[in-house]
Image (cartoon, coloured by chain):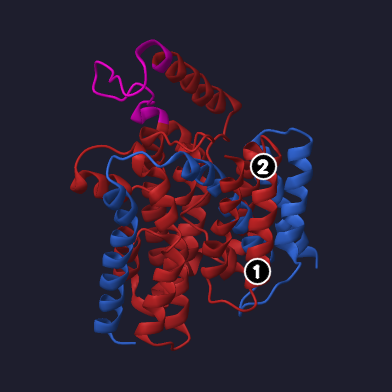
């Protein structure tokens, strides 16, 4: 169970938490952004180079702060799991380079039970295929030429993507990029702590830390439930994932659940 | 597992993940999505989040489904959400309920 829950590790969740004040800040910022956009028209461009409808990077960092604890805890779990398989240095390097928790857990777990290199790599990449639809979704809100867009896309992790989602099909890129910063630091630090000090730490599962992630996702989901349309997609997505878990490789159920978003074709 | 295998795995996962994350932004460029696609994108978050919740809470190892301590912790979080408690309280309740049940059962 620990393994599976940890599957979501880094790609934590939303960020409105820690203090209600944070959520209020984000909302207030969104309101200001809307006002700016109304004043200048879409794509007007603010004096400081930001888009007219964007928050500041620091707003994203603040939005991501509540994710530090879960990212740290799951990062430690990963370090503890990975160190016996690959050594501490490689475990830390993997968190820095791959930077995708669920995929890291899946790949290392396969290696740990003697699986092949091919199966470890393909499992990790399958889990990350959800970033294809997610990347298409944020693409119109990123900036610059192909290289810069590719670089900005690297900051996409589940929780930051969900935080940046405005709910109307558009995304706030500063929120996405900013929210990833504290999560990344916590993920790398957690991995290092787990890999270097794992023997002293014990199993994070005894503290119930593996329940942090689904609870965060649920809280995020609750905020999305603005109307019946969202509810129907959520229920269908959950159903698709549950049905596929017993049959499909890890990662596929979540990717397949994105098909529930196709319900959105009906409305227009 | 040889050291070489480990580093090949890390390298392939790194390159593959970078490519996957870059694909959407590079392919679409700065173009806006067509209006019909916008409706689909708006529903991606609830679809994916709901899937993450159930896979996390009910998925066991070896492709099994189970109702266990984590699921109970999630149920407690759901009640806390209905009670309009702050999010940090909601997630802590989930962890505490899960930990207590693990210790007791």
**Residue, x 44% and y 54% (percent of image)?**
A133
Q: Which mark is residue A229?
A: 2
Q: Main secondary structure of the magenta part?
A: loop
Quadrant into which the N terminus of chain A falls: bottom right
Q: Position of residue A226 (x, y in %)?
A: 66, 34
Tell me which chain the residue with mark 1 is part of.
Answer: B
The hue in which chain A appears in the rendered picture of the protein: red
**Residue, x 29% and y 44% (percent of image)?**
A152
Q: How crowded is the residue under tag 1: few (<14 C-alpha within 10 Å), some, or many (20+)?
A: many
Give me the C-alpha separation between circle 1 and circle 2.
Answer: 26 Å
The span picked out in magenta is A37-59
Rendering quarter of residue A219: top right
Q: Is residue A150 above or below residue B56?
A: above
Magenta stretch holds residue A38? yes
SS class of the residue under badge 2? helix
Q: Position of residue A101 (x, y in %)?
A: 44, 61
The hue in which chain B appears in the rendered picture of the protein: blue
Identify residue for label 1: B59
């Amino acid at each position: 169970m620990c393994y599976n829950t940890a599957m979501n590790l880094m790609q934590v969740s939303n960020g409105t938490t820690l203090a209600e004040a944070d959520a209020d800040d984000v909302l207030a910022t969104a309101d200001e952004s809307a006002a700016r956009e109304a004043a200048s028209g879409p794509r007007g461009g603010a004096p400081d180079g930001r888009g007219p409808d964007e928050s500041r990077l620091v707003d994203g960092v603040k939005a991501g702060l509540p994710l530090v604890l879960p990212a740290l805890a799951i990062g430690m779990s990963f370090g503890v799991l990975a160190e016996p398989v690959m050594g501490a240095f490689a475990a830390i390097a993997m968190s820095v380079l791959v930077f995708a928790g669920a995929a890291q857990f899946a790949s290392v777990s396969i290696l740990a039970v003697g699986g092949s290199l091919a199966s470890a790599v393909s499992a990790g990449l399958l889990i990350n295929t959800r970033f294809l639809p997610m990347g298409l979704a944020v693409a119109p809100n990123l900036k610059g030429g192909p290289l810069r867009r590719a670089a900005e896309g690297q900051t996409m992790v589940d929780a930051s993507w969900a935080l940046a989602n405005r709910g109307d099909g558009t995304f706030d890129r500063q929120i996405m990029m900013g929210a990833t910063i504290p999560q990344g630091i916590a993920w790398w630090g957690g991995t290092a702590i787990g890999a270097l000090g794992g023997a002293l730490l014990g199993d994070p599962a005894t503290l119930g830390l593996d329940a942090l992630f689904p609870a965060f996702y649920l809280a995020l989901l609750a905020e999305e439930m603005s109307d019946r349309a969202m509810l129907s997609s959520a229920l269908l997505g959950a159903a698709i994932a549950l049905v596929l878990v017993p049959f499909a490789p890890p990662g596929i159920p979540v990717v397949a659940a994105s098909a529930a978003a196709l319900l959105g074709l009906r409305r227009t | 597992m040889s050291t070489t295998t480990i580093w090949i795995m890390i390298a392939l996962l790194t390159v593959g993940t970078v490519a996957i994350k870059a694909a959407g932004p590079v392919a679409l460029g700065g173009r806006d999505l067509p209006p019909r696609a916008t409706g689909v994108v708006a529903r991606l978050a609830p679809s994916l989040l709901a899937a993450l919740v159930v896979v996390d809470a009910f998925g066991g190892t070896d492709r099994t489904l189970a109702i266990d301590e984590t699921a109970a912790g999630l149920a407690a979080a759901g009640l806390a959400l209905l009670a309009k408690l702050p999010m940090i309280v909601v997630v802590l309740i989930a962890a505490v309920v899960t930990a207590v049940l693990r210790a007791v059962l």
